[in-house]
Amino acid sequence: MIDELERGVKTLETTSVTITVNGTPWKGEIPVEDVLLDVLRSRVGLTGTKRGCESEVCGACTVLVDGAPISSCSYLAFEADGKAVTTVEGLADGDVLDPLQDAFIRNVAAQCGYCTPGQLMAAKALLEDNPSPTYDEIAHWLTGNICRCGCYPAIATSILEVAAEKRA
C-alpha cells in the first residue's frame, strides 16, 4: 500500500507474466501499469538499468527486448511477456566482460557512469544490426542516449574498436 501511495497510483488490475531475463525465466504477477524498468529493478532485482528522464529521451534505461533496444521507462512490463530481455547485467559471462564493456573501460568511455548501462545496451544492438558502423552511423544510432559528461568520442571509439576486433 505504501508503494502505491508513493507512486500516486492505485493498482486495480494485475497480470501474470513470464519474461526471460538474461537467459533466466522470471515469472510474476504484476500491476498492469508497471513499466519494465520498475519490474527489472524492484521485482527481478537487477539495478544496472537506470531511471533517467522517464520520457524516452535520455536512454539511461535502455535494455534489449528480443534484441531490439527499448526505453524500459515507458515500455509496459506486460508487453515483455514471453520475450527475452537483456540488461547490462546480462552482457558479461560470469567474470568475463563483454568486449564492449572491456572497450568502454579501456577507452574511459564513462565518467560518472550513470548513462553507461544504456549506452552499452544501445551499442550492443547497433553492432548486431550493423557490425561495421562508421563514426557517423554510431552518432546517429546513439542520439537517444545522452551522456551529460560528454564521453561520446570515447564511446564511439569503443564501438569502433569492438567492430574492428570482430572483423579481424
Image (cartoon, helix red, strand yellow):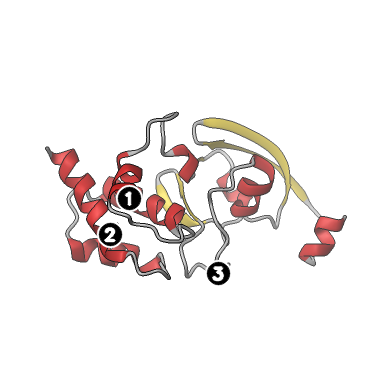
Categorize mark 1 by other alpha carbons within 10 Å: few (<14), some (14-19), many (20+): many
Name the residue that disc number 1 marks: 104
Kind of residue sitting beneath label 1: Phe
Instruction: Find numbered disc 3 in the image and state the secondary structure of the residue it sits on.
Output: loop
Q: Position of residue 39 (x, y in %)?
A: 65, 48
Kind of residue sitting beneath label 3: Cys
Q: CA distance from mark 1 to mark 3?
A: 23 Å
Name the residue that disc number 2 marks: 154
Q: Position of residue 109 (x, y in %)?
A: 33, 56
Q: In the image, what residue occupies the spot 34% across and 49% down?
A: 125
| Sooner in the amino-acid sequence: mark 3 or mark 2 | 3
Whether residue 49 can be seen here? yes
Q: Is residue 78 above or below residue 137?
A: above
| Quadrant of the image occupied by residue 52 | bottom right
Name the residue that disc number 3 marks: 53
Instruction: Find numbered disc 2 in the image and state the secondary structure of the residue it sits on.
Output: helix
Instruction: Find numbered disc 1 in the image and state the secondary structure of the residue it sits on.
Output: helix
Q: Position of residue 167 (x, y in %)?
A: 14, 40
Q: In the image, what residue occupies the spot 62% across and 34% down?
A: 26
